[in-house]
Image (tube, rainbow, N blue to C red):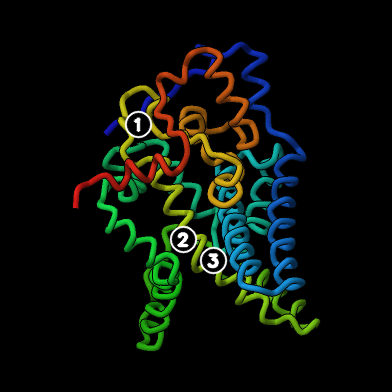
């Protein structure tokens, strides 16, 4: 099918307005990376200083949400929006966003840009994430349980590794990735350094308890919720402002589910090169100009999940 339509920003914004939201900063992207790691270290330190079930649960949720935040910043880098210098944009994403969580900007970028080119069409590689909805509440509950018990993590992260190892033991070569890269090497360089530093102070247990557990539990769940909110049950038309949903998240939702303005997804799809830190301003401009009536907007993630689980049992 043909690529989806694109909006010319000049048909909506003045030159000054568009410049104010499209301009890439030299410092804001790095500052967001620093803020993500500050929350991660702070949440972990809170549990270390005051170890109890409540602080551990809080740490897992905050760290898991910031792991998603690092993926969100990698996503911005895929659009060249994390830093004004494109080479530095990619380097920051590789080593300070995706490396610690096992991501690959080089592999993610072509995949994701295909999603933008063919949003909700048969060629969209993310169509499988939105097509099943709505589902029953029981179906969603089972998915959430799989996420929170590590089953999704095992299926997505561990099982492919074990399958490749089994092939190698048989003397066979695993099928090569479409895009050559070594995210596993970066993962173990960064995480190995963290393990060594923690072990030097006898805190070796922090890595599995406060990095892997959030990655295996809260991160899969909030990633699922985010995916549902962005594209499930959206009445997509030829209008680019209809290609995704914006969820007006409250402070707690932004803290635990939707970091770094990821909830302004309709705006992102219409103007995909706008940096994440300008999406709220972009939304305000669209609202001032009466353009938000063309968008699918939810008032919180509870509203989205009620809609996504509305299929009768």
Q: On the image, numbered disc 1 is attached to which residue?
A: 3
Q: Secondary structure at mark 2?
A: helix
Q: Nearer the viewer, residue 304 or 278?
A: 304
- Mark found first going from the N terminus, 1 or 2: 1
Q: Quadrant of residue 79?
A: top right
Question: Which residue is located at x 70 percent, y 82 percent?
Answer: 204
Q: On the image, numbered disc 2 is attached to which residue?
A: 220
Q: On the image, numbered disc 3 is attached to which residue?
A: 215
Q: Position of residue 123 (x, y in %)?
A: 30, 42
Mark in the foreground, 3 or 1: 3
Question: Which residue is located at x 62 percent, y 35 percent?
Answer: 275
Question: Which residue is located at x 58 percent, y 39 percent?
Answer: 261
Query: How far is mark 1 from mark 2, CA to CA?
Result: 30 Å
The answer to whether mark 3 and mark 2 are in CB contact below 8 A is: no
Query: How far is mark 3 from mark 2, CA to CA?
Result: 7 Å
Q: Which disc number belongs to residue 278?
A: none
Q: Is residue 269 left or right of residue 76?
A: left
Q: Is residue 114 left or right of residue 37?
A: left
- Whether 279 is drawn above or below 78: the answer is above
Q: Is residue 17 left or right of residue 218?
A: right
Q: Position of residue 152 (x, y in %)?
A: 40, 67
Q: Quadrant of residue 178?
A: bottom left
Q: Is residue 33 visible?
A: yes
- Mark found first going from the N terminus, 3 or 2: 3
Q: Is residue 114 visible?
A: no
Badge 3 density bin: few <14, some 14–19, many ≥20, Cα 10 Å: many
């Amino acid at each position: 099918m043909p690529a989806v339509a694109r909006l010319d920003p000049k048909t909506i914004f003045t030159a000054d307005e568009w410049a104010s939201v499209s301009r890439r900063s030299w410092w804001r992207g790095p500052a967001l990376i620093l803020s993500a790691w500050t929350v991660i270290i702070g949440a972990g330190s809170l549990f270390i200083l005051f170890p109890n079930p409540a602080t551990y649960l809080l740490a897992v949720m905050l760290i898991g949400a910031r792991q998603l935040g690092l993926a969100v910043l990698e996503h911005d880098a895929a659009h060249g929006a994390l830093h004004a210098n494109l080479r530095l944009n990619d380097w920051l994403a590789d080593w300070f966003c995706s490396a610690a969580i096992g991501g690959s900007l080089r592999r993610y970028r072509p995949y994701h840009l295909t999603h933008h080119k063919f949003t909700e069409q048969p060629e969209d590689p993310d169509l499988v994430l939105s097509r099943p909805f709505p589902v029953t509440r029981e179906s969603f509950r089972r998915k959430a349980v799989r996420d929170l018990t590590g089953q999704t993590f095992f299926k997505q992260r561990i099982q492919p590794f074990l399958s490749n190892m089994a092939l190698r033991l048989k003397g066979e070569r695993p099928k090569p990735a479409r895009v050559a890269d070594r995210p596993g090497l970066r993962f173990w360089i960064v995480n190995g350094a963290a393990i060594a530093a923690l072990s030097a102070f006898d805190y070796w247990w922090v890595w599995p308890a406060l990095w892997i557990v959030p990655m295996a539990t809260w991160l899969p769940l909030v990633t699922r919720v985010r995916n549902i909110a962005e594209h499930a049950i959206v009445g997509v038309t030829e209008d680019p402002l209809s290609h995704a949903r914006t969820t007006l998240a409250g402070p707690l939702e932004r803290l635990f589910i939707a970091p770094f303005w990821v909830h302004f997804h309709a705006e992102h799809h219409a103007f995909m090169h706008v940096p994440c830190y300008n999406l709220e301003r972009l939304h305000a401009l669209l609202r001032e100009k009466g353009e938000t009536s063309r968008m699918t907007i939810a008032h919180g993630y509870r509203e989205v999940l009620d809609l996504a689980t509305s299929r009768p049992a």
